[in-house]
Amino acid sequence: MTDASSGFLAGRAALVTGGSRGIGLATAEALRAEGADVLVCGRSRPALDQARSRLEAAPGPGRVAAVAADVRRHDEAQRLVAAAVEALGRLDILVNNAGVGRFAPIGELSVDAWVETIETNLSGVFYCCRAAVPAMKRGGGGWIVNVSSLAGKHPFAGGVAYCASKAGLNALTESLMQDVRREGIRVSCVLPGSVNTGFGGGRPSPEMDWKLAAEDVARAVVDLLRHPARSLPSRVELRPSTPRK
Ligand SMILES: NC(=O)c1ccc[n+]([C@@H]2O[C@H](COP(=O)([O-])OP(=O)(O)OC[C@H]3O[C@@H](n4cnc5c(N)ncnc54)[C@H](OP(=O)(O)O)[C@@H]3O)[C@@H](O)[C@H]2O)c1
């Protein structure tokens, strides 16, 4: 734990999808810094190995695990949740962060790109939640935080697939929140604007410092978990304070 951390998540177990880089990795680091055991997933094994080494070197007393899984596949999502319970002994926190961005006008957007976007950003979240809710109920409750986007609220040209996937995710989140809130599972979504990661290709760069940092989004996720059990902040919007004109 760092000096600034309180360790309020000690003994808690967290699964972060898409935790091999970007916002997911920063979130796993932040959860670990607060004492949680964390398991990250992604599709690329080398990227996961790197993430695991980085997490193990970061401050935090908890366990670290990394599992290769493709959230677009229902069976893999189920296996992922089972692996988290097996490795960490329980599941208290699920951060659905894995996502892809394919941007093009409709005539140039392939059917494959549409399917990949909807399956990753929307169906994948459904599969992970469906697998995780019974495990959380067994443990007496938990948190599900879905990393959505302001694009789900403010659609733009070239974003037919991405904006639709995140609008659907916002609806899924609010519906699920009402399904499980009385069972001690609090569901919320974080809607970031532009974040300086390699999302959609490219790399994070100093020229993009005007954007949010992955750590800013991670902080918003961890702050949600600090709320007392009676309080459920169900949606957080987060944007760069000085956007580029
Ligand atoms: N960056 C932004 O400007 C921004 C803004 C608003 C919202 N968001 C949202 O934030 C989330 C994270 O974005 P990021 O910027 O951190 O992107 P990123 O750096 O590209 O990271 C995406 C992560 O998701 C994983 N992933 C992708 N498809 C997957 C699949 N089918 N199964 C399992 N893991 C998968 C990737 O690993 P593999 O490729 O190895 O699978 C990687 O770990 C996304 O949901 C995105 O929509 C991003």
Image: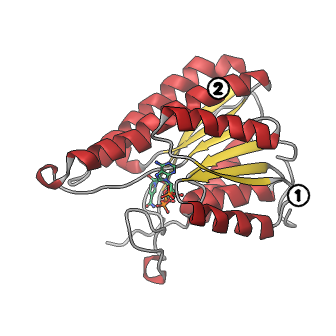
The residue singled out by tag 2 in the image is 133
Looking at the rendered structure, the kind of residue marked 1 is Pro
Tell me which corner region of the image, top left, top right, bottom left or bottom right, holds residue 123: top left
Question: Where the N terminus falls, by quadrant?
Answer: bottom right
Query: Going by the image, does 187 lie left or right of 7?
Result: left
Tell me which corner region of the image, top left, top right, bottom left or bottom right, holds residue 55: bottom right
CB of mark 1 near ligand 1 (< 8 Å): no
Q: Are marks 1 and 2 in contact (CB under 8 Å)?
A: no
Mark-to-mark CA distance, 1 and 2: 26 Å
Looking at the rendered structure, the kind of residue marked 2 is Val
Q: Position of residue 9 (x, y in %)?
A: 82, 46
Can residue 153 be seen? Answer: no
Identify the residue shown where x is 42% and y is 37%: 122
Residue density around tag 1, few if under 14, some if 14–19, many if 20 or more, within 10 Å: some
Q: At numbered mark 2, what does the secondary structure look like: helix, strand or loop?
A: helix
Q: Position of residue 216 (x, y in %)?
A: 60, 62
Please state which of residues 5 and 141 is positioned toward the viewer in this rendering.
141
Q: Position of residue 136 (x, y in %)?
A: 72, 27
Give the label on residue 61, or none.
1
Identify the residue shown where x is 57% and y is 26%: 130
Q: Please tell me which of labels 1 and 2 falls first in the chain.
A: 1
Query: Going by the image, does 57 lie left or right of 219?
Result: right
Q: Which residue of the protein is positioned furthest toward the bottom in this rendering?
A: 206
Q: Which residue of the protein is positioned furthest toward the left in this rendering?
A: 107
